[in-house]
Amino acid sequence: MNRREFLGASTVAAMALAAPGRSDGAARGPKALLELRTYRFASAAKQKAFEEFLAAAMVPALNRAGIQPVGVFRMLAADNPKMLKEDSTDLLVLLPHATLESVITLNDRLLADAEYTKAGAAVINAPQKDPAYARMEVNLFIGFDECPGVETPAKAPSRLFQLRIYEAHTEERCRMKVRMFNEGGEIAIFRRVGMNPVFFGHAIAGTKMPNLTYMLGFDDEAAMKKGWAAFLADPAWTKLKNDETYKDTVSNITNIVLRPSAASQI
């Protein structure tokens, strides 16, 4: 078996193991591998410089490498008062991949892109004493049957996004929560009441495992509040949440409100 065949087989295996399929074997489309990077910066100035690098060099290079749309997001204190006293200097970057090979080879492909290395030289070749970012954390997910890839539901300049992490105490319960979203119809309820998915992913590597993580997009804060109110009052949700099949599927929820960076394509 050559390297390409091995990577292809590995992708199929990862998909089979990472996310339970629908009982009828059907799906909306191929499930993407979703890479969510969190870049951490020593200062707001470093964050701003990296945003400029993303817009001018990295996002165009990612698109040339077949990665699109690229999401770039910030956390503001005003949107997350329980979590932050001041704006976060982190940047979250969402990268959808069609294959495992794309995940594995992406950094090499970027560094082989002459346009990218020229446009982003100051960041790419930053000295050890003055690094462009402090650290980068990566989480990898596989898309859901009912939301296999990345969607771009919100277009307004005032748009915002919710990133929600559902941790479970066992992998079995995490998989059952995935089924609740897919076969149970929770994603369908979301869509019907205006809770528009950007992505839904079952974690296959990263932090806070086992977990599933999803992002919703809204045109503004009022649309977010309206969507959640409609969801919580929906009779189908009331019935679904009381189904004993899905008991104890979530042990902790992290809820983060994000704003798109100027570099974001989402």
Image (cartoon, rainbow, N blue to C red):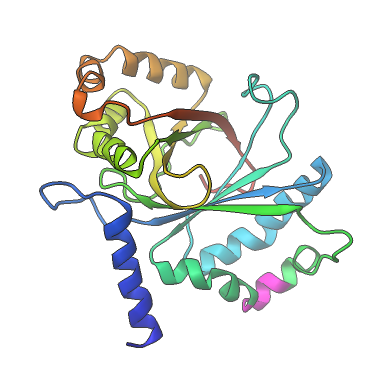
Residue 86, percent from left and from top? 75, 27
Question: Which residue is more in the foreground, 184 or 225?
Answer: 184
Residue 67, percent from left and from top? 48, 61
> At 34% from the left edge and 39% from the top edge, which residue is drawn?
174
Question: Which residue is more in the foreground, 131 or 150?
Answer: 131
> At 47% from the left edge and 28% from the top edge, which residue is drawn?
253
Answer left or right for 73 relative to 7: right
Answer left or right for 204 relative to 159: left
Q: Is residue 152 above or below residue 77?
A: below
- Name the image quarter holding residue 216: top left
Q: Is residue 232 above or below residue 116?
A: above
Q: Is residue 215 above or below residue 240?
A: below
Q: Magenta residues?
A: 112-117
Answer left or right for 171 relative to 133: left
Q: Please state the total of marks drawn on the protein image.
A: 0
Residue 106, percent from left and from top? 54, 69
Farthest residue, direction front: 170
Farthest residue, direction bottom: 2
Image quadrant occupied by the N terminus: bottom left
Examine the residues drawn in magenta and state their main secondary structure.
Answer: helix
> At 52% from the left edge and 28% from the top edge, which residue is drawn?
255
